[in-house]
Amino acid sequence: MLTLIQIELYKIFRRPRTYIAFGAIASLILIIQFGLKVDGKSYTDFLMKDIGGSMVIDGNIINGYLICYIMLQLLLVHVPLLVALIAADMISGEANMGTLRLLLSKPYSRTELLLAKFLAATVYTIMLLIWLAILALFLSMWIFGLGDLFLMKSSYVVLINQNDVFWRYAGAFVFAALAMVTVASLGFFLSIFAENSIGPIVATMSVIVFFTILSTLNIPIFNALKPYLFTTHLISWKEFFDLKVNDANEAIIGSIQNPQRIITSALVLLLHIVGFVGGAIFIFNKKDVLS
Amino acid sequence: MQQIVKVTDLSKQFKNLTAVNRLSFSVNEGDVYGFLGQNGAGKSTSIRMMLTLIEPTAGQIEIFGMDLSKHRREILRNIGAVIEKPDVYKYLSAYDNLQLFARLSGIKPTRKQLMEQLEMVGLAQRADDKVKTFSQGMKQRLGIGIALVHNPQLIILDEPTNGLDPQGIADIRNLILHLSRESNKTFVVSSHLLSEIEQIATRVLIIDKGKKLVEGNASELLDPTQTIVELQTFDNAFALQQLKASKWADKVQGHRNNTIVIKLDRREIPSLHTDLANMQIQLLSLQPRHSLEDYFLQVTSGNQHVDTYSN
């Protein structure tokens, strides 16, 4: 099994396509960092225009922590596409190249092969998130420095002491990794039905867009569905940045306002991963390979 | 002689299509087993079932004396295959592909061993070139190298000479014959190039519409007493008249498209040649036609070949 995983990782990281995602993330982050470094003041003035008259904020608002938060909000919408590029190609790409039949005539079970491929796709996804963390968090911390994290939510603002931020990012990135692995598992599942890569990649993104629209629509008939849609839970990493407050309405350091929501979301995502991968294994084991 | 493959009543149904219909055959150790049939006859489906790519609807496959459905891993460890096209990872080099598939087959060969393998299939000079720069023939040779890299006992080659130039075809043919004779490897080779099978196969299976038509030793199928000879003469009407009045009358099969067809024992050809001269028949050509291809066409087309020459 270890050999299979090594071989799958070797194949992923020898393909030029793999580095498109790393390059795209690096380009986007560097452009955003450049823009905010050059014209960050205008950006914060724009954000603060509604509340600027009612409160005074001192210190370094445009700091590495805020930049990272802005980038996570922007990029985690698009990272699924970069994940799907690889995950949705894992089986369909082999079928398209014609290597699937040779691979399946080797002395490994189909279950072993699929698990190895999924684990390799998971490693790729996690590496993508680590790359995102290095550039969005650590590079931003280096370029913009540190400070308290000031966030504007829809109806309130959150101010997190700079000493209370880093662990939240660690949690957020771990959760984001889980969310992206869920996307990878969906792409992987769809990959077994096709003999070209484009179909499953487009199908993965279509499912995500479709479910995201259902998740955000505020129509009562769809509300009952929302807790079961994985797209509802993909953004639960934001829960790490909502704090509990005490009676004096002061933020409690080290607290999370609704930790249960994070746990529930993580469980829903895990169930989806198990469902997608289990479904892929079940169907693929019964499939005749005609490619 | 040990039986390497034993297929019993193998069937595969795709919805309304019966691709393979109660097919039974066996392959012995050291055989070069020619697997023949027209397009859609069920050859590839049968080969894919032997490699567990397709689940049989019914029947049993035993390889190395073990049931394939129960001992898949042990069996596949000892099989090398090229299935239809020699598709490999185009973004990797020939050497990297060979190494990758060697590891997938459970072995870790040294660079020297891998280079020897590439040398054997004539790709040592291109070992480090990416496969995307290879011609179809080079990919085919690499596919065969991959099939052989883990030194399997049974090698299944589906159309192994596809895309090869005449020299490449001869090289592959010689390689198969060499490995069969020197290393006692067993080959199952399907090909539409019947002349190739004719030159290498020790035993032959011909299937049509998923059913076995005939199985046997190639030499037995190519019975020399049933050789077809095609004659073209300056005056075919005169030649036919002379032949029907001679001892060859019973052997004349017919006349069509300026060709007189005679069925005889191959050893009678010199005598026929002499008699034609004695009967003052001016001969334009005398073409013995008894190859596996003729036999194949005969059995897969409902004796089409013989009927073609009927009066």
Image (spheres, rainbow, N blue to C red):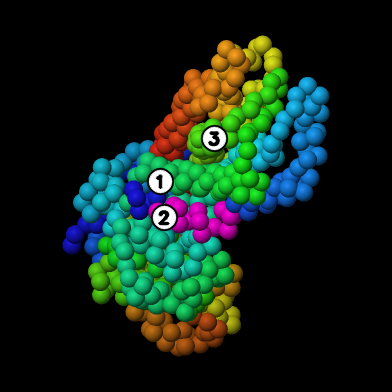
The reply to the same-chain question for discs 2 and 3 is yes
On screen, residue A263 above or below A181:
above
- Residue A249 x %, y %: 61, 16
Query: Residue at 73% of width from left, 48% of height from top?
Result: A37
- Residue A124 x %, y %: 50, 47
- Residue A195 x %, y %: 55, 46
Tell whether label 3 touches label 2 (CB within 8 Å): no
User: What's the CA distance linking mark 2 and mark 1?
Assistant: 9 Å
Query: Residue at 26% of width from left, 49% of height from top?
Result: B62
The question of residue A12 being in magenta is answered with yes
On screen, residue B43 above or below B235:
above
SS class of the residue under badge 3? helix
Task: Answer whether residue A136 is visible to the viewer in this image.
Answer: no
Amino acid under disc 2: Ile
Which range is magenta? A6-19
Would you say B201 lies left or right of B170 here?
A: left
Amino acid under disc 1: Ala
Badge number at residue A116: 1
Q: Which residue is mark 3?
A: A163
Tell whether label 1 touches label 2 (CB within 8 Å): yes
Mark 2 Cα shell of 10 Å, populated few (<14), some (14-19), many (≥20): some
SS class of the residue under badge 2? helix
Earlier residue among tags 1 and 3: 1
Q: How many marks?
A: 3
Q: Nearer the viewer, residue B253 or B109?
A: B109
